[in-house]
Amino acid sequence: MAATAIDLQPYASLNDADCDKRITAAKQALGERVVILGHHYQRDEVFKHADFSGDSLKLSRQAADSRAEYIVFCGVHFMAEVADIISRPEQVSILPDLSAGCAMADMADLEQVERAWQELNSVLEADEFVTPVTYINSAADLKSFCGRHGGIVCTSTNAQKILDWSFARREKVLFFPDQHLGRNTGYKMGIPLDEMVVWDYDLPMGGLTAEQIKGAKMILWKGFCSVHQMFKPDQIENFRRDHPVGKVISHPEASFEVCQLSDYVGSTEYIINTITAAEPGTQWLVGTELNLVNRLHQTLAGDNKTVQFMSPMVCMCSTMFRIDPQHLAWVLENLVEGNVVNRISVATDVADNARIALQRMLDI
Ligand code: 13P
Ligand code: SF4
């Protein structure tokens, strides 16, 4: 082990081309001891170094299956936490920049969810009637809460299956933190909008009456993704006017109105697979993060496919963007020198219960 870790500061002045060479050399030196996982929202200069890319579910499975000593997660904080929870104890999960969080995940914390549970308990027996379901975009202690209360984790890929599982056990679901994924999935399963109420975590009893809670099938946390809320129905209408045979595809974190107007709705992996498999010459409007859309546009230009970003504004996930080649070079060169920097380590008691909720999901 080297005595002290290599300092990050000198990497700030490295250009991307130099970082590229150093990342490649460090990866080569580490060989199978390291695996780099890259979410689809990563910028190209980082994404190109990923051994595996995917959506949250696919990358969780990769982390669970990996035998590498080091899992370097080019994504956001909750993803590296999941990798730590479901990998073996001797494996190390690393997030190249610790400030790469998820703004939506930050919209629910344990204290708020515990309070909501207590308040629900004042109206009905929550542990008997309500399954807590957390979107994977959440802190480990919320996954742990779900593990302790008979609940489960979902991703944008499996939300419907997870809700089927949940309703087979208890009559209601408390879904956090993304109201849109909850509503879009619930509606697709036939739950009327008026049986899905929004829990405003800033208000006592979520701003709901006892009757509203008793009458609801789904209680949706008032969280959202600021990137996906940039997509609007008029952007789809404009596209359809200019491209009468064009297709619209959106991520389920987009609003109900946007998803209703879209031809297809699904995870980042689903979006990529659907457009890639489409006929040459087709035209697409895509409601998800900009780096993914730009990469698809470039990859499929040879097929004469048009892949257009839904919003006229630039809206990328600023926290995903924090993982840059400089940070990636820094963590890898530290590993070569025997130093682990930016380890993500979830406390054992939290991890044990979070693993229960994650394993329920992975088993489905
Ligand atoms: P996916 O699981 O579809 O990749 O979504 C993750 C995410 O954070 C979307 O904003
Ligand atoms: Fe979180 Fe939204 Fe970024 Fe996805 S796009 S990681 S939900 S902030």
Image (cartoon, helix red, strand yellow):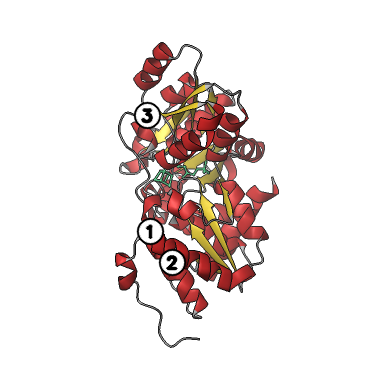
* Residue 311, horizontal then vertical, whole percent: 35, 29
- Kindly identify the residue that appears in the image at 61 percent across and 61 percent down: 86
Location of residue 289 (image quadrant): top left
Closer to the camera in the image, 349 or 346: 346
Q: Could you tell me which quadrant the C terminus lies in?
A: top right
Relative to 3, residue 96 above or below: above
Q: Residue 102 at x, y = what percent?
A: 40, 50
Classify mark 1: residues with Cα within 10 Å, few (<14), some (14-19) or many (20+): some
Instruction: Report the mark closest to the observer, 3 or 2.
Output: 2
Q: Is residue 194 above or below residue 245?
A: below
Q: Is mark 2 on a helix, strand or loop?
A: helix
**Residue at horizontal 47%, vertical 36%?**
298
* Alpha carbon distance from label 1 to label 2: 10 Å
**For residue 282, what is the image quadrant?**
top right
Is 342 positioned to the left or the right of 24 in the image?
left
Residue 329 numbered tag: 2
Going by the numbered disc 3, the residue's amino acid type is: Phe
**Residue picked out by circle 3:** 231
Spatial separation of the CA atoms under disc 3 and disc 2: 34 Å
Quadrant where ligand 2 appears: top left
Q: Which label is found at residue 16?
A: 1
